[in-house]
Image (tube, rainbow, N blue to C red):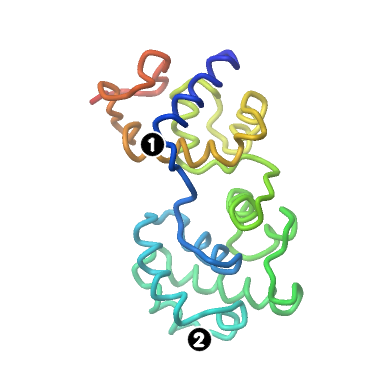
Amino acid sequence: MEQKQVLDIIKVLKDNYPNAKYYLNFSTPVELLVAAILSAQCRDEVVNSTTEVLFKKYKSAEDFANANLDVLAKDIDKITFGDNKAKNIISSCKILVEKYDSKVPKSIDELTSLPGIGNKTALTILINAYGIVPGISCDTHVIRLSYRLGWTKNKNPDKIRDDLEKIIPKDDWAKITWLLKAHGRKICLAPNPYCSKCFLSDSCPKYGVVKRL
């Protein structure tokens, strides 16, 4: 797909989702780090309902670092893979306390050295906690929609990110994740998208779509 077509689609997405924003609730970088760890393979609604209570009990990196593993695991028992995520949260926050003066670091390399933090999560934290945008965060919606739209032929998130960053203006790198997620949740569902209701239908090649609604 030519870049002009990509830019036209981005404009239409912005027009239709003017209030698109990051989807997890947080008030500090530490809260975002915890929420982002919890969000892996877990629905945003479940994460937000969990953190609404969790962040009243644990208010700092120190609180999480000193948490009892069994108690924290119980506190997040509605989260998928909660036991493992509880371990990662405690371990990561201990590193924050011991190495970073209880602050969340501001580089990809430092963030990905923390347990439970991969490249996508690191980008998510930098973009949404600090406004630092070194790349596009490719969640499951970005991966699915960018392939269907013909913006990439790759399935690997790192290669998809490279493809998208070549055709999407840097000013839109943060916003594109929110826009595609909003559209992916409302219209371009997995596995069966509502193509009949989609305002992008005429310009979308629908790659990989087997059944349309």
Residue 174 appears left or right of 58: right
Disc 1 marks a residue whose amino acid type is Gly
Q: In the rendering, at what x and y percent does residue 159 appear?
A: 63, 32
Query: Real-space Cα distance between discs 2 and 1?
Result: 37 Å
Q: In the rendering, at what x and y percent does residue 207 appear?
A: 42, 20
- Could you classify mark 1 by the number of other residues whose Cα lies within 10 Å: few (under 14), some (14-19), or many (20 or more)? some
Task: Give the residue displayed 57% in from the left and 38% down from the top.
Answer: 157
Q: In the rendering, at what x and y percent does residue 84 appear?
A: 49, 69
Q: Are marks 2 and 1 in contact (CB under 8 Å)?
A: no
Residue 99 appears left or right of 163: right
Q: In the rendering, at what x and y percent does residue 125 appear?
A: 61, 56
Q: Quadrant of residue 167?
A: top right
The quadrant of the picture occupied by the C terminus is top left
Dot 1: element: helix
Task: Give the residue displayed 29% in from the left and 23% down from the top.
Answer: 195
Disc 2 marks a residue whose amino acid type is Asn
Q: Which mark is residue 70?
A: none
- In this figure, which residue is indicated by the disc labeled 1? 184
Q: Nearer the viewer, residue 21 or 197?
A: 21
Q: In the rendered view, would you say 194 is above or below 32? A: above
Task: Give the residue displayed 66% in from the left and 41% down from the top.
Answer: 135
- In this figure, which residue is indicated by the disc labeled 2? 68
Q: Nearer the viewer, residue 17 or 112?
A: 17
Q: In the rendered view, would you say 119 is above or below 192? A: below
Dot 2: element: loop
- Which of pointers 2 and 1 indicates the residue nearer the eye? 1
Q: In the rendered view, would you say 152 is above or below 71? A: above
